Image: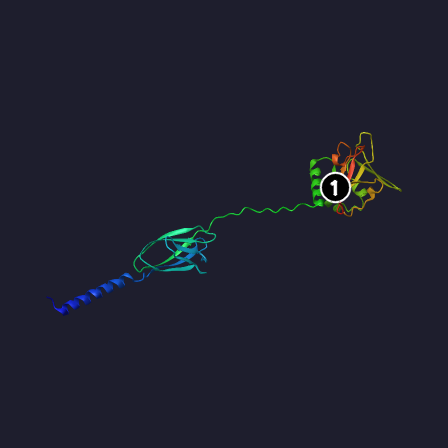
């Protein structure tokens, strides 16, 4: 039969060994990941990025300096995923040894979104549309045209002074006033119709209209030369169209 002392010693030794084993089994993992998330192009920190260890419940966000920490990790292999607004989702395979702390910089590539161009078009005013139409007719090569710049350069006070030098137009002045006639009509000289800002005007007053405020003049010396929008059903001669700043 064995000694009671020896038996007690063996029992104490076995209990101590089991206690050490139990402590080793419940020891907390000491590994971890200390990371910094940055923009791959600018190298600036990316704050607010969501960092996750896939397959676990571990989640964290990077701070304003791009830093985050995942502590208390056991040894093993982890798949770390980082998401941030304006960047592509990126993941890394991390292998940790027992008690190892990895310090790493995680780079995110910005998404290459290209916004469609925004074109802002302003609708032209009525006066602008009239001048656009004037230029179209002027480029058409039918008739004679006097622009605002030419009116200013001439320093003419009235329309009579402007029309004196237009080919196919003859200005006759007497004590009672001036009359403008077209010289290219099939039946000889004739008195043209007058149009001011798109509306018919009287022949007696229009030749003496001051040039102040006049921005363009169109002279058509025969019905065949006159655009349809200026012709009347009884037109026998040409048309002189005046455009002013105060027009409708």
Q: How many marks?
A: 1
Residue located beneath label 1 in the image: 146
Task: Name above or below for residue 131 compared with residue 6.
Answer: above
- Judged from the image, the secondary structure of the residue bearing numbered disc 1 is strand
Taking the spot 43% from the left edge, 56% from the top edge, the residue there is: 50
Taking the spot 80% from the left edge, 43% from the top edge, the residue there is: 159
Taking the spot 21% from the left edge, 64% from the top edge, the residue there is: 17
Task: Name above or below for residue 95 compared with residue 242.
Answer: below
Which of the 4 quarters of the picture holds residue 202? top right
- Nearest the eye: 42 or 211: 42
- Please say whether residue 227 is visible from this viewpoint: no
- Nearest the eye: 186 or 99: 99
Residue 130: x and y, percent? 71, 42
Residue 152: x and y, percent? 75, 47
- Nearest the eye: 1 or 14: 1
Q: Left of 80 or right of it: where is 133?
A: right
């Amino acid at each position: 039969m064995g000694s009671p002392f020896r038996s007690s010693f063996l029992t104490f030794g076995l209990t101590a060994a089991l206690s050490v084993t139990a402590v080793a089994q419940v020891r907390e993992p000491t590994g971890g990941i200390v990371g910094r998330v940055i923009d791959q192009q600018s190298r600036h920190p990316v704050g607010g990025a969501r960092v996750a260890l896939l397959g676990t419940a571990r989640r964290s966000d990077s701070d304003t300096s791009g830093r985050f920490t995942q502590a208390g990790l056991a040894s093993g292999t982890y798949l770390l995923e980082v998401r941030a607004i304006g960047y592509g989702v990126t993941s890394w395979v991390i292998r940790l040894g027992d008690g190892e702390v990895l310090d790493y910089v995680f780079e995110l590539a910005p998404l290459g979104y290209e916004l469609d161009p925004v074109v802002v078009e302003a609708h032209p005013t009525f006066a602008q549309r009239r001048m656009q139409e004037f230029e179209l007719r002027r480029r058409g090569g039918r008739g004679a045209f006097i622009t605002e710049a030419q009116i200013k350069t001439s320093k003419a006070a009235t329309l009579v002074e402007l029309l004196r030098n237009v080919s196919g137009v003859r200005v006759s002045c007497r004590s009672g006033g001036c009359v403008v006639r077209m010289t290219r009509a099939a039946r000889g000289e004739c008195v043209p119709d007058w149009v001011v800002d798109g509306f018919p005007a009287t022949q007696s007053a229009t030749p003496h209209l001051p040039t102040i405020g006049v921005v363009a003049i169109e002279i058509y010396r025969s019905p065949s030369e006159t655009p349809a929008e200026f012709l009347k059903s009884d037109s026998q001669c040409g048309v002189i169209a005046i455009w002013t700043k105060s027009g409708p």
